[in-house]
Image (tube, rainbow, N blue to C red):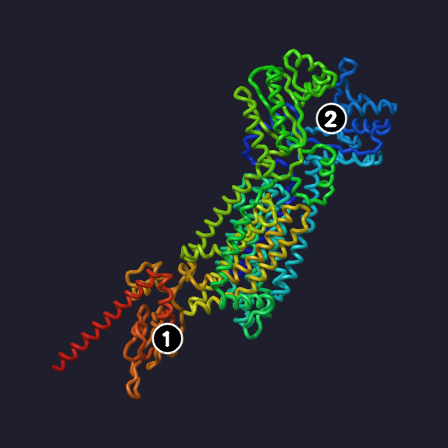
Amino acid sequence: MVGVNYRMASLLFLVLVTAVSALGLQKLRVETDFSSLIAANDPKKMMYDQVAAEFGSDNRSLIYVRDVQLWTPEKLASLERLHRALESLDFVERVEDLFTLRSIRDSDGAIDSRLLIAEAPESEEDARSAYENASYNPLILGNYLSNDGRVVALMVSVKAPPDERGFDHRVNGALEQIVNNWKGEFDELFQVGPPRINAEMQASLYDDLVLLAPLSMGLLIVTIVLLLRSFMAAIIPVITSILSLVWAFGLMGWSDIPINILSAMIPSLVVVIGSTEDTHMMAAYFQGVSESRGDRRAATRFMMRHMGVPLLLTILTTSLGFVSNIFNGIGLIQDFAIASAVAILANGVITVLMVPMLLDRIGPRGSSVNDESGRVGGLPGVVVRLFGFSQQRFSSAILVLTTLLCAFFIYHASQLHVTNDPLTYFHSDRPLIQDVNRVQQDLSGIKLFFVTLESKDERAFLEPKNLRRLTEIQEFIEEQGVFDRSVSLADQLSLVNREFHRGDEEYRVVPNTRELVAQYLLFFHRNDLRSYVSNDFRRTNIVVRHNVSDSATLNRSIKELEAVAEDIAGGDIKAYVVGENLMINESAELLMSAQVKSLGLLLIAIFLIMSTMFTSFMGGVIALIPAMIPIVLMFGVMGLFDIPLNPGTAMVAVIAIGIAVDGTIHLFSRYNELCRRTSDYEEAVRQTVKMEATPVVTTSLALSLGFGVLLLSNFTLIAQFGALSALTMLFSIFANLLITPIIMTRVRVVALHQIIGLSASKEVLQGSPLFKGMSEYQIRKAILISEMHDFTEGEMVIRQGDVGRSMYLILSGEAEVLRRVGGDEQCVAQLKPGEVFGEIGFVRETTRTAGVRAASDLHMLRFDFEKIGKDLKYFPNIVAKINFNISCILGERLVDVMESQAKQQSSQD
């Protein structure tokens, strides 16, 4: 109630934090760089940097040119101008194409080594000759020239300056401008590569931010208005969400945490997840309004009295769900974990301070959620009646069926595979993906990696035996059948050797002697070999091109290649398989291990929180069951429909558990409250479901629709995250309103905050014979498994002649024991706080021999025999001590009676 009791201070705090956060928004930046997809502790990163520095980066863009009249002087002249334009760009390190590649060919017994096309040919004959030379070279055909001769590739190597933000965006813009300038000169022309992928990620991210958050907010308003039938109930989550986003993004700006493709989900997540507690609070407020007949202050206090602890618990568990992703080694996910957890915590703080403040001042004075009979209306009512019928008739069958269903989905969950390739983040109908596939049809794939061999000996790779090791590794690569093409120094030398033997393919092998190797190298310019061998010939490089997007397939094949390369290299040469694309895909393996770690730690944390808050390890275990069922079903759906585990879907489980346990917390809290008023626990469960159905169904549907909005994202991983999260929220309705009630009838919990906050005199409790020998904690817990009752002065508590099995303990006030003999009523005893009465009826069903009336306002505990009997299996130690003390009380009473009778007998004698 801080927001109500300290309104001005709370407003000042909210305004101040919002203003400071707003200043941080201008520092906010967007980052879609591939480095965030690589594990921060990847041991191969250093070796990759060394290889890229020496042999050239694998950050290469491919310019695709297709034309049916390509090999004409006019088209080749246009191609040359395109080549020169690309070379003039300041960030271009090298352009490899028909104008830089070398033709090595036998010419009447002599070796003709020259550039394939030094300059655009002027005649048709020269153009045809250039085509023949290009198609004759096996290192060019398939790599730079399609088999039909209609497609050529210009491979642009890019060198990024250190710490230049937005570099890929600048590169893509420059390449796109050049492509657009030359498009009219060829049938088809486009560019693909990391800069374009990165730039399109950034553009798609902005589109998502503009579209998803407003759409989520609109759906949220409609859903809440329809189900809670209150416009204000829909506006409050909008206000808290907007402020939460300002706080979260402002803090990201101040902390230099960038927005990435996952962070683009945060506005939608805050809108839909933040609305859950607002909805539960509004439902409790409406109940308070109904009971207080329109008194806003009373309704607000009722809401916070019933919602305070569940609200704080759900904020904590939901935040834990998000922040647990920080254990993932991928920077993309770590940044999202921090930003999303801060956003949820900010939403919690704003909700706790602002919502009671608003409702206390301008809250509705009436509610139409429930009809006059108290029945739950609308869709929640349908769910309650359907599930209620199933629980009463088929509870055992439902549990068995749920167990079998979970087993079925666990089996399919075992078929999950992992992927982390950036190209899989886009939908298949995107022009980018279609262009990549087009390249794959005509040429080798656009993705590169390197197999690097390093020797301690200088000029080691002038030795034929070492060069043959390259050939053996390349032969294995070809046997794998996964990668498109590989090129090495051995290929270049083998080509020369073939031409020295008049083009005989039998001689397309590494030359036999070091002298021949040295001689053949004279036919190459140093730039021709820069990508394949170091200046001192101690290191050599195999360039491999591919188009594999499945991380599982790629990682498996790379591990095989690493093992074989190391074996072929032998003990004197080290072999490395490196590439940025490889590191990105290898980090996918962290997704599975990090998912298991995050999920395990979150479950332990939730178990400890729930066990502590409800003072029962069994309660902690049972609380996890309805949270786990939706997750098991979700993983099963992923396996069944071949949805991969990627940076988006990897987060669903931990986030969904943190959200799904929200409903369980509210159900347990309400159930615990009702159990203090009745011994009919099954009826308490029915009332719990009835009271919580509207907020549970409303929040789950709102969450499902909100997550469903993410299906409209430009990224497949976000769309998959949204679809799976939406499905999980629907599963949570089934788990919370069908499975949880069945389980709750088999458990009894007591909330820790009620034990701590119990208002009762310590002296009265410890001095009562009913609690003799019990610790303060045990006494408080014993009180909470009883029933609280209040009586006004003059009201009868027990009537003489009635039959009852209840016993009472006075907490405050006084009572008088009345006995009626004939027509006269006499007060035979005065009862004070701490005293017990009705214990004989509690032990044995009998007619009350005296009545008890409140001599002042009474606050008492009622111990019902049937209820205590039920609680024996839940709280055996507490009930056993109470029963022992009851026997002691009865024994003392019996002794008193016998002593009284003995005195009377003695006086008569």
* Residue 726: mark in rendering: none
Position of residue 840 relative to residue 645, above or below, is: below
Q: Are marks 1 and 2 in contact (CB under 8 Å)?
A: no
For mark 2, give the secondary structure: loop
Left or right: where does residue 508 sit relative to residue 773? Answer: right
Mark 1–mark 2 distance (CA, rounded to whole Å): 103 Å
Quarter of the image that includes the C terminus = bottom left
| Front residue of 507 and 7 | 507
> Label 2: how many residues lie within 10 Å, few (<14), some (14-19) or many (20+)?
many
* Residue 140: mark in rendering: 2
Q: Where does the image place residue 668, in percent across and percent down from the top left?
A: 47, 61
Position of residue 377 relative to residue 707, above or below, is: below
Mark 1 belongs to which amino acid? Ser
Q: Where does the image place residue 248, in percent across and percent down from the top left?
A: 59, 48
> Label 1: how many residues lie within 10 Å, few (<14), some (14-19) or many (20+)?
some
Which residue carries the number 1 mark?
856
Position of residue 375 relative to residue 59, above or below, is: below
Q: Where does the image place residue 93, in percent across and percent down from the top left?
A: 71, 26
Q: Residue at x 49, y 66 (%)?
A: 394
Q: Residue furthest bottom?
A: 823
For mark 1, give the secondary structure: loop
Question: Closer to the camera: disc 1 or disc 2?
Answer: 2
| Front residue of 698 and 209 | 698
Tell me which corner region of the image, top left, top right, bottom left or bottom right, holds residue 467: top right
